[in-house]
Image: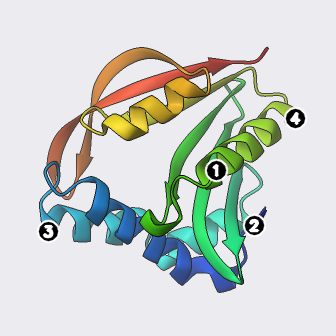
Amino acid sequence: MTVRRATPADVDAVRTVARESWETDYPSILSRESVESGVDEWYDPDRVRAALGADDELLRVAERDGAVVGFAHGLVDGEGGSGHVLRLYVRPDARGEGVGGRLLERVRDELFDRGVGRIHAMVLADNDPGNEFYRSFGFELVERAETTIGGESYPENRYVLERP
């Protein structure tokens, strides 16, 4: 498996990984309509392509046997000296192989290399595996907030990792 910078050829794969992940992880949390609406909004092809060319964004994919099996999307907040892991998803059939960890480590290291002192991550509060994932990498829960997906509001946990 390799982790690399995403290219325009990866846009559809990123959308597919997101959709498969949401359908697997959130069936009791999000309605089918919210999944479709959220994927269409958050992973609109133009939006994903724009992230590829943005100086303050990192879009990395994990590839195994020529197929994208996961992605992470990071953002540098130029004003606050902080960074964000906006999204990190792994195809359900590739979980348990360290893909998510490798993606998170890559984006974390690149954000710290860019001078970020603090990294934020957000996870739906009811996504137990996602919450445990970030805690296992040293992220600390700092706030509970709300996020909107498909016009519906959902509780979200917000985490922070300080630069060592």
Task: Work out how far the residue at label 4 is from the one at label 2, CA to CA, in angstroms.
Answer: 23 Å
Going from N to C along the chain, the mark reached first, 3 or 2, is 2
Relative height, residue 147 to residue 69 (above, below): above
Residue bearing the label numbered 3 = 33
Circle 2 sits in a helix, a strand or a loop, which is it? loop
Neighbour tally class for label 1: few under 14, some 14-19, many 20 plus, Cα within 10 Å: few
Task: Work out how far the residue at label 4 is from the one at label 1, CA to CA, in angstroms.
Answer: 22 Å
Going from N to C along the chain, the mark reached first, 4 or 2, is 2
Instruction: Say which residue appears at 76% left-offset and 27% top-offset.
Output: 116
Going from N to C along the chain, the mark reached first, 3 or 4, is 3
Going from N to C along the chain, the mark reached first, 3 or 1, is 3
Disc number lying in front (4 or 2): 2
Instruction: Say which residue appears at 35% left-offset and 27% top-offset.
Output: 157
Residue bearing the label numbered 4 = 113
User: What color scheme is it?
Assistant: rainbow
Q: Kindly check if marks 1 and 2 are in contact, taking CB atoms under 8 A apart as contact.
A: yes
Disc number lying in front (4 or 1): 1
Task: Work out how far the residue at label 3 is from the one at label 4, CA to CA, in angstroms.
Answer: 39 Å
Disc number lying in front (3 or 1): 1
- In-image side of 142 versus 156 (left or right): right
Q: How many marks?
A: 4
Instruction: Say which residue appears at 73% left-offset and 77% top-offset.
Output: 7
Q: Amino acid at mark 4?
A: Asp
For the C terminus, give its image quadrant. top right
The numbered mark at residue 98 is: 1
Residue bearing the label numbered 2 = 1
Q: Amino acid at mark 2?
A: Met
Task: Work out how far the residue at label 1 is from the one at label 2, CA to CA, in angstroms.
Answer: 10 Å
The numbered mark at residue 11 is: none
For the N terminus, give its image quadrant. bottom right
